[in-house]
Image (cartoon, rainbow, N blue to C red):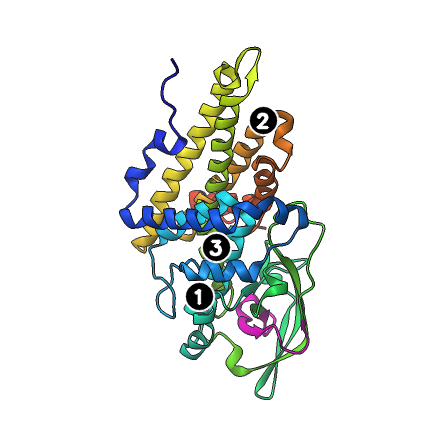
Amino acid sequence: MPSPRQTPDQLFGIDDLLTSEEKAIRDTVRAVLKDTVRPHLDTWYETGDIPARELARAFGEVGLLGMHLEGYGCAGTSATAYGIACMELEACDSGIRSLVSVQGSLAMFAIHHWGSEEQRQEWLPGLASGELLGCFGLTEPDFGSDPGGMRTRAVRDGDDWVLNGTKMWITNGSVADVAVVWANTGKTPGDIRGFIVPTSAPGFSAPKIKSKLSLRASITSELVLEDVRLPASAMLPEARGLRGPLSCLSEARFGIIFGALGAARDCLETTIAYVGDRQINGKPLAAYQISQTKLADMTLEYGKGVLLALQLGRLKDEHKLAPYQVSLGKLNSTREAIAIARECRTLLGANGITLEYPVMRHANNLESVLTYEGTAEVHQLIIGQQLTGLAAFR
């Protein structure tokens, strides 16, 4: 008789490391996703589109949007609880987690942390409820890993600012009501400032990026600003230089630490079930040594990643988490998650390339997750600088 099966989480005793509140949040997010997302994922992935506004309202109803922020309609949960929610979101799809991350950790965090009280009151309640959608414009066509070189300019004209430039790879861009856009007001990275830009402003457009092979269940756009005129009150008053946008990126990266592992877990659980049912030469594929060694190695890396994520979450809740520690988690989670997805595909054989199973979809999505919010190479250099005391970015 075969012995009872254990899930990867059971093997590591993950539940014992979570508080009752964290488990309740996990279960709530799973239930919402089961009803609103999972039945439609294959269609959304094939069509390259999602009902972003409907999803935002559904997520807002259960307090998912900006859930780790305080006040203004935000749930005010712990950072670890937010991470666990990201894990459940990305266990469905990286694009779904991206919608929530961009809304809460980029657009909302920027306004919450760097905005004026008037800006917070005006924008955050609508963003928290999902009645409004936000996006975050930092990356440019020629400046991804070097945001200090951005060409988007903001020029003072009387009491107003006039913005010109182009942003690229912007999640939620073409469906957003408001964009947080970063622009250079002078000639140096120290002159970079953030602006709250209503997408209805004359001169603002957001053409959708099509023909993606990754993050297809997500809306990705270009932002084009042509003489967009804004009042002085549109500037985020507390953000000066790259410290502003980079702090937002650190928030988003934290969610990815957990999120990527959710995709890995979904791949693992799918594959364990598949090899248990698949018969090869009269016995389950799971009964072969090669299958078990692959599963054991993948589960080990997954479990170590979750333990690291929880440690980083506890540090963040104690206000002790440094940006370079976020890089440790983001590099590890994304690198191991994509390796797990690819290895799981080998165990599913030809079935692994179809949308009947989520493995290839996760693997394709993780190609983007490995790159955005700082490439793997950037995070290696951040860690290397901490170890050596020497910067090697140029």
Q: Which quadrant of the figure contains the N terminus?
A: top left
Q: Amino acid at mark 2?
A: Leu
Q: Amino acid at mark 1?
A: Ala
Q: Nearer the viewer, mark 3 or mark 1?
A: 1
Q: Position of residue 299 (x, y in %)?
A: 44, 29
| Residue denoted by label 1 | 128
Q: Position of residue 169 (x, y in %)?
A: 63, 57
Q: Amino acid at mark 3?
A: Ala
Which structural element holds mark 3?
A: helix
Question: What residue lies at 65% left-to-right and 60% top-to-bottom?
Answer: 221
Task: Give yes or no for contact between labels 2 and 1 (Cβ–Cβ under 8 Å).
Answer: no
| Residue denoted by label 2 | 348
Examine the rendering and report whether any part of residue 363 can be seen: yes
Q: Position of residue 297 (x, y in %)?
A: 46, 25
Residue 21 or residue 369, whichever sits in front: 21
Q: Residue furthest bottom?
A: 158
Q: Position of residue 365 (x, y in %)?
A: 59, 44
Question: What residue lies at 49% left-to-right and 19% top-to-bottom?
Answer: 286
> Does residue 193 belong to the magenta stretch?
yes
Sequence-wise first label, 3 or 1 = 1
Sequence-wise first label, 2 or 3 = 3
